Image: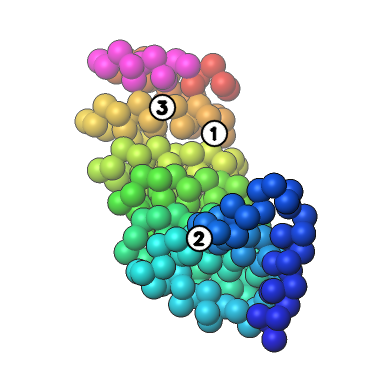
């Protein structure tokens, strides 16, 4: 059974520890949880039978100490645990959602089915979770046909952190973010000065579609707002 294999892996982790500190790790719950995670990292997909139990721990509000290591263990198991981790992305607790994003990140391109949920997390009410989801989307650079339109929409969010995270994702997609250019040009004239500044910066960071963008940034020199003019000029220098 998976429990027997896990115990063997756990003992291997313990055997590799300095005897001087071993008792501290086995006596303290949080530390023991980290050792347990190490055992799952050794087993990887072989621990797939543990997915239901780990999922139960993650979703148990009483498992405060064990929830994060359990989420990490699901990530160590791999793609077979992805459905469970995707479900955690909608957990009411921000820490659980963030842990799930971190665990999914370990799966690399195998995380493709989670892209729609990660897109939703960019608009998360918790700025840390939003940033983590945006960073993962930027790293994976999967499903541009889904991600680019969604991030373009997020540029209009009332939440400044969401706008910044969305812009960073678009920049990561480089040429594939081309469909976002018309919206960025429109935002350059937004009454929200922060949004206008972000649009100017993002156009400069993308460095695409010069035939359209360069005239727009040049026109930005006439904007009455000093910082918008500044970022338009700075971005123009990237072309």
- The residue depicted at 50 percent of the width and 60 percent of the height is 29
Whether residue 143 is visible to the viewer of this picture, yes or no, is: no
Is residue 235 in the magenta section? no
Looking at the rendered image, the quarter that the N terminus falls into is bottom right
Look at the image and give the residue range highlighted in magenta.
224-234
Which mark, by number, is residue 86?
none
Left or right placement of residue 137 versus residue 165 in this view: right
Disc 2 to disc 1, how far (Cα)?
48 Å
Which mark, by number, is residue 29?
2
To which residue does mark 1 refer?
206
C-beta proximity under 8 Å, tags 2 and 3:
no
Across and down, in percent, residue 115 comes to 52, 62
- Tally the numbered discs: 3
Disc 2 to disc 3, how far (Cα)?
50 Å
Relative depth, front residue between 134 and 211:
134
Whether residue 192 is visible to the viewer of this picture, yes or no, is: yes
Disc 3 to disc 1, how far (Cα)?
10 Å
**Of callouts 2 and 3, the N-terminal one:** 2
Callout 2 secondary element = helix
Relative depth, front residue between 232 and 193:
193
Looking at the rendered image, the quarter that the C terminus falls into is top right
**Of callouts 3 and 1, the N-terminal one:** 3
Residue pushed farthest bottom?
A: 1
Relative depth, front residue between 89 and 230:
89
In the figure, residue 3 lies in which quadrant?
bottom right
């Amino acid at each position: 059974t998976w429990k027997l294999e896990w115990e063997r892996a756990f003992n291997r982790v313990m055997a590799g520890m300095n005897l001087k500190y071993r008792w501290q790790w086995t006596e303290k719950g949080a530390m023991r949880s980290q050792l347990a995670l190490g055992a799952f990292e050794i087993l990887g997909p072989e621990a797939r039978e543990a997915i239901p139990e780990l999922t139960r721990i993650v979703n148990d509000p009483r498992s405060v100490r064990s929830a994060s290591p359990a989420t990490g263990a699901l990530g160590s198991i791999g793609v077979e645990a992805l459905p469970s981790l995707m479900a955690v992305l909608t957990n009411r607790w921000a820490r659980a959602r963030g842990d799930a994003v971190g665990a999914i990140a370990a799966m690399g391109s195998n995380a493709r089915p989670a892209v729609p949920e990660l897109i939703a997390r960019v608009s998360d009410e918790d700025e840390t979770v939003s940033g983590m989801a945006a960073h993962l989307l930027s790293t994976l650079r999967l499903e541009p046909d889904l991600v680019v339109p969604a991030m373009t929409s997020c540029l209009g969010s009332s939440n400044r952190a969401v706008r910044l995270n969305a812009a960073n994702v678009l920049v990561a997609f480089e040429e594939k973010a081309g469909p976002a250019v018309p919206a960025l040009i429109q935002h350059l004239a937004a009454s929200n000065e922060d949004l206008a500044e972000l649009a100017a910066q993002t156009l400069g960071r993308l460095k695409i579609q010069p035939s359209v963008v360069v005239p727009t940034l040049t026109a930005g020199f006439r904007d009455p707002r000093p910082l918008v003019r500044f970022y338009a000029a700075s971005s123009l220098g990237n072309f």
